[in-house]
Amino acid sequence: MREVTASGQSVEEAVQSALEQLDTTRDQVEVDIVDEGKKGLLGVFGSKPAIVRVNVPADPVEDTRKYLQQIVENMGVTAEVTAAVTGNRVTYDVDGENVALIIGKRGQTLNAIQYLVHLAINKDLSEHYAVTVDAQGYRNRRKETLESLAYKMADKAKRLNKEVTLEPMPAFERKIIHHALQNNDQVTTSSEGLEPHRHIVIRP
């Protein structure tokens, strides 16, 4: 949150001074009148300036977008970060050059960045945002890959009549596997092990 205290011959003049210092507009701020001031004799003698405290409320979505933009730039990637909000879900999308650096092997770097962003946006909030960080549609491509893997490994478990263990993956990716096979009555799925090595086991 940015805040300034300003004074002027009137409340409006003090507010205008604060807006100029904050480089913003009246509809973007909260105004607290510290002292309404008073006009003196002939407008001069005994006059008292008006004092206001003006602040720009914190915008966690935008502040976190800037934080993510800084991470991207510090990684040497030329890209733009945009944010889309639906209810309590925020999706940040990274679009630009060399985004493969942001994604990493099997999305591991992107998942780590998403974890940091989740912590950053929710650190001072009582009601938490669910966060997704994407890079040029990687999440959809990864979802399709995981669904394909789920079907393939389910077939393998049925064919060999024994359990198949998948590689460790984060909870939101394991959820994709579970969901893909939830209506398959020939196999069952379970998550086993401890983070960060928690993995899915598919059993006939």
Image (cartoon, grey):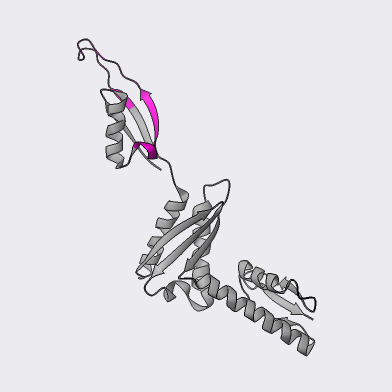
- 127 in magenta: no
Find the magenta span and give its range. Answer: 26-51
Say which quadrant the C terminus sits in: bottom right
Q: Left or right: where does residue 181 sit relative to residue 114?
A: right
Q: Residue at x 59, y 78 (%)?
A: 145
Q: Residue at x 53, y 58 (%)?
A: 118
Q: Which quadrant of the structure image shows residue 146?
A: bottom right
Residue 102 % position (x, y)? 44, 71
**Residue 167 visible to an observer of this rendering:** no
Picture layout, residue 191 above or below residue 13: below
Q: Left or right: where does residue 38 sit relative to residue 58?
A: left
Nearest the eye: 108 or 98: 98
- 44 in magenta: yes
**Residue 153 visible to an observer of this rendering:** yes
Nearest the eye: 130 or 180: 180
Residue 23 % position (x, y)? 29, 42
Q: Which quadrant of the structure image shows residue 199?
A: bottom right
Q: Residue at x 72, y 82 (%)?
A: 154
Residue 65 % position (x, y)? 43, 57
Picture layout, residue 22 above or below residue 128: above
Check the image and name the residue furthest to the bottom.
Answer: 160
Say which quadrant the N terminus sits in: top left
Count up the numbered dots: 0
Picture layout, residue 134 above or below residue 33: below
Q: Residue at x 27, y 28 (%)?
A: 13
